[in-house]
Image (tube, grey):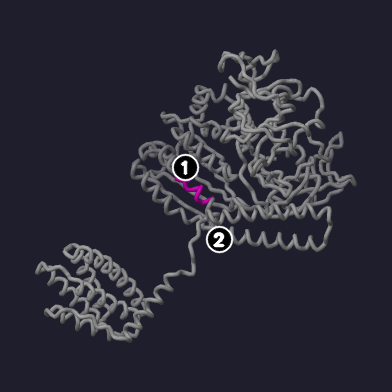
Amino acid sequence: MSEDKYIKIFCMEIEEHIKEIGAYLKTLADNPKSKDAAGSVMKSLHSIKGIAGTMGYSSVLKLSHATEELVDSHLKRGIALDDASLQLIYDVIDAIEGFKSSLPVMDDSIIKRTLKRVKDASSGKKPQRVVERKELEEKINSSVDEMLESIDSNIKINVGTIDEIIADISELKYTEQALKALNESIRSYKLKIIIKKINEQLVKLSHRLIQIKMQPFDTIIEQLERAINEYCLATGKKINFTVNTNDVMIDSTVLKILIAPLIHLIRNAVDHGIEPVQERKETGKTEKGNISLTINKVHDFVEVIIKDDGRGILTEKVIGKAIEKGYIDERPYVIDGNFLLYILTHPGFTTKDDVSTISGRGIGLDIVRSSLENIGGCVSLNTKRGEGTQLTLNVPVTTSVIRALLVKSAGETVAIPSSNIIRILLAGGDSFTKDADGVLINYIHEGKEVEVKRLASLFKGSRGINGNNGNNEYNILLVKIKDEESALLVDELICEEPVFIKPMTKPLKKLSTVLGYSISGDGTPVFMLDINSL
Amino acid sequence: MDIFVFFVDNDFFAFKVQTVQEVTEMRRLVKVPGSLGYIKGAINYKGTLYCIIDPSLLFKHNRTHDDNKAERDFDIIILSDDRYKVGFLAEKIIGVKSIDGSGEEAVQAAKATFLNGVCKVDGFDVKLIDEKEVFNTIERAAYNLML
């Protein structure tokens, strides 16, 4: 270790003790007879003595030793430290501070003078405060420096305040859109340029603010690990918790919202998912249960996977309970993760019997789901009896802005996240395979057949032109839906821009087709489509 | 019991008076992708998204007559529920009416989804809408779409 590092360590340790002495001197000023406070001052002086000795700073060692003796003699004689003595000790810590600041030069002139005063006081002379003009000036200057240092150039700002500023920007964005709409009738080139500039600046500003809000996912891992350890101690289970955050960064508002659901799901995995050691041995599993947490960034979303190798959900019992409670009339034909989630997240579906890995936690799971839905996220479940359960949470990287392509279909404007779009194409009618009625079935893209989907089909009773612009040409968005490429037919392309999204309100909140909505320049809502629902 | 009566497509409907927050003029309804047929659309009302329901479509698939043109003169009844942001279309607002008896005795049981029952007002049958059932059905349907 370099000498520099030793000095840094010395300074850091000394600083702690100096702060402690300062605090106890305040106590002694209020209560001069406090033996505890005087004892604590001695202890800190003793520590300083030790550290100074290790570093070879003999003058500091001598001063702290003499001051310790002074306090000790008062304590032994049962005499309270008077104001003059307290002032002297303040001067001692100032002298040590001064020495510390002079390092590595080791200016101990003040230390030596103060040592003389301490010795005088110990021998019965009333301590006198000798402050030379030069020393006073130095003191004032160093106080100014300290005060300047205490005003940090980095300030803390509440995330809520940033959110409020972003909301204000989104209001400005609506104004900008209103101007744009107005200019369509005025058609002023100058105004067009101004609007463009406003738009650029708003985007830049919102992006900067969002960057400020970003935090690494790692920030909450320690908290989760601690929770796991506590649950292990409480249940007597042994668990191997593995984490892979892939250095994903996420909006701190989203991260905050995720903490409670994650702790809840991990607790469920420990409590109900992972079997007791004996049961695991009997089923041929390792003594230690495994819970893994994996974080992936998928376009504008963060995927959080919590997986355990426990006993899985007892599907039949969950269904039995759901019928008993009247949530469903009969056993459904298809039972999958979504169906189980629908039952398990039913408000009030909480059973005290141990029916599943997440049973007895119905209310909690409902809260998990609604917390995610509030920010345009969702949860999915996969479980296999005897093998474990996997819960996947999908949340937006940020709740504030998503870059999206605005398109029109069936007379309605919708926003499609740009991250879902691979390519935008204008295709001739002969680029498609058709059925006997001439309905487009597949689009032939680079020799491959890609399934055609119609955005207009999402609007009931729509009179959409299904992407045909009248010249036997079609507007196509080549999108990725659940890892498969699809050709999405839209009537009109409007523009690509950052869209400020708000979460859906009830009862539309659970609608899987939309991620949220924004407000257009004319005050009407524009829905942000969840392409995976198509 | 006081009820708030309105008229749509040859039928009288009503809510318990305390259910109604206010009445606002018709505005452009934006279609909600993938939503149920009786959800006519959504509006931005005082900065919040409201889902707008056509009550006549709760009980039949289509309106008796094509009134898309007349819809411009409709009103929207905003309900006062704290959690659910919902409005109902009204062709004509009749207003608050008192019906004899309190609560259930005044309302004749009528076996139909979305209905609390039917009551008589000035000799006409008025369908008292069970708005909670409407909210729950929309939420359940959202799940069905997902399944």
Q: Position of residue A468 (x, y in %)?
A: 85, 44
Q: Is the residue A451 above or below the residue B60 in the image?
A: below
Quadrant of res A13:
bottom left
Quadrant where the image shows the C terminus of chain A: top right
| Left or right: A148 in relation to B61 | left
| Residue A189 falls within the magenta-colored stretch | no
| Left or right: B48 in relation to B56 | left
Residue nearest the viewer, comparing A170 with A526:
A170
Mark before the other along the chain sequence, 2 or 1: 2
Q: Which residue is mark 2?
A: A212
Residue drawn at point x = 20 percent, y = 71 percent? A83
Disc 1 marks which amino acid?
Answer: Leu
Q: Position of residue A243 (x, y in %)?
A: 47, 52
- Residue extending farthest to the left is A77
| Residue A263 falls within the magenta-colored stretch | yes
Quadrant where the image shows the N terminus of chain A: bottom left
| Left or right: A353 in relation to A367 | left
- Main SS, magenta region, reads helix
Q: Position of residue A215 (x, y in %)?
A: 52, 58
Helix, strand or loop status at disc 1? helix
Q: Which residues are magenta?
A: A254-264
Q: Which residue is mark 1?
A: A265
Circle on res. A457? none
Disc 2 marks which amino acid?
Answer: Ile
Residue nearest the viewer, comparing B81 with A259:
B81
